[in-house]
């Protein structure tokens, strides 16, 4: 469905496992500010989220030296009083330096961090979103009502979450990348009609 002035476009595919909503949006349109944030808040529908950040998926310069970013993030999380779990591991990551250009040592071993944190819906205002989530790649998992947040954070921390069905475990989940004006929302809870209604609400504001 194509929305007013092509601000937001959504295509939906459904299979037995889950429904996938491919949302594309225009950021630089004055009539609708903060489009990505508004889409995320509407998708949350008043439910809380867990954010999963893996520095090995960052842009080349950041993923090779993520420590400064992680230290700053920890300070912000503490300032907001946000509950989080962090693990650290050695990973092979793509080299952003001249060696990559000349195909010499295209990858190297570097320290990668995985930080997962819980944000209640009421606490995720635009300022918080800008401080913690803008300009980095991250996965957002919308938590089902009644879920054990401590247990979910522990699953991220241990890495066991990667072997689980996110569509079954969460209300919805999607990966955000600031360089791409799109979201790929995977869910078993949000139908095509419901998604269209959520997106149309943004246009009407």
Image (cartoon, rainbow, N blue to C red):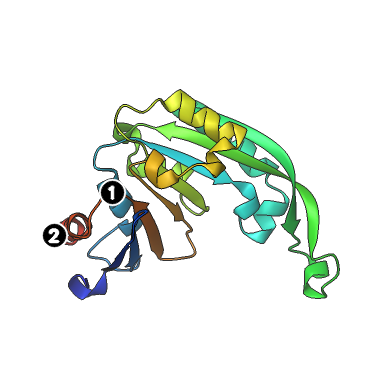
What is the C-alpha distance between the residues marked 2 and 1? 16 Å
Q: Quadrant of the N terminus?
A: bottom left
Q: Quadrant of the C terminus?
A: bottom left
| Rendered image quadrant of residue 25 | bottom left
Q: Is residue 7 above or below residue 124?
A: below
Report which residue position mark 2 lands on: 204
Residue sitting at x 39%, y 47%: 167
In x, y percent, where is residue 115? 57, 37
In x, y percent, where is residue 181? 41, 66
Residue sitting at x 50%, y 41%: 164
Residue at the front extreme of this rendering: 16
In x, y percent, where is residue 152? 47, 31
Q: Could one spot residue 75 in this view of the protein?
A: no
Q: Could one spot residue 186 in this view of the protein?
A: yes
In x, y percent, where is residue 120? 35, 31
Report which residue position mark 1 lands on: 43
Q: Residues within 10 Å of mark 2 (few under 14, many from 20)?
A: few
């Amino acid at each position: 469905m194509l929305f007013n002035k092509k601000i937001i476009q959504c295509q939906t595919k459904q299979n037995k496992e889950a429904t996938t909503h491919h949302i594309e949006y225009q950021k630089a349109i004055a009539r609708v500010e903060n489009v990505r944030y508004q889409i995320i808040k509407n998708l949350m529908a008043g439910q809380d989220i867990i954010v999963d950040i893996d520095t090995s998926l960052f842009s080349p310069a950041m993923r090779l030296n993520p420590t400064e970013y992680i230290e700053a993030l920890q300070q912000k999380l503490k300032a907001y009083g946000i509950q989080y779990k962090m693990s650290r591991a050695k990973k092979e990551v793509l080299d952003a330096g001249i060696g990559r250009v000349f195909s010499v040592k295209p990858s190297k071993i570097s320290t990668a961090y995985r930080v997962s944190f819980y944000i209640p819906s009421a606490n995720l205002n635009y300022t918080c979103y800008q401080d913690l989530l803008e300009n980095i790649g991250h996965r957002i998992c919308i938590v089902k009502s009644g879920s054990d947040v401590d247990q979910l954070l522990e699953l991220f921390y241990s890495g066991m979450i990667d072997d689980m069905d996110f569509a079954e475990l969460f209300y919805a989940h999607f990966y955000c990348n600031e360089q791409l004006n799109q979201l790929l929302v995977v869910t078993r809870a949000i139908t095509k009609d419901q998604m269209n209604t959520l997106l149309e609400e943004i246009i009407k504001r």
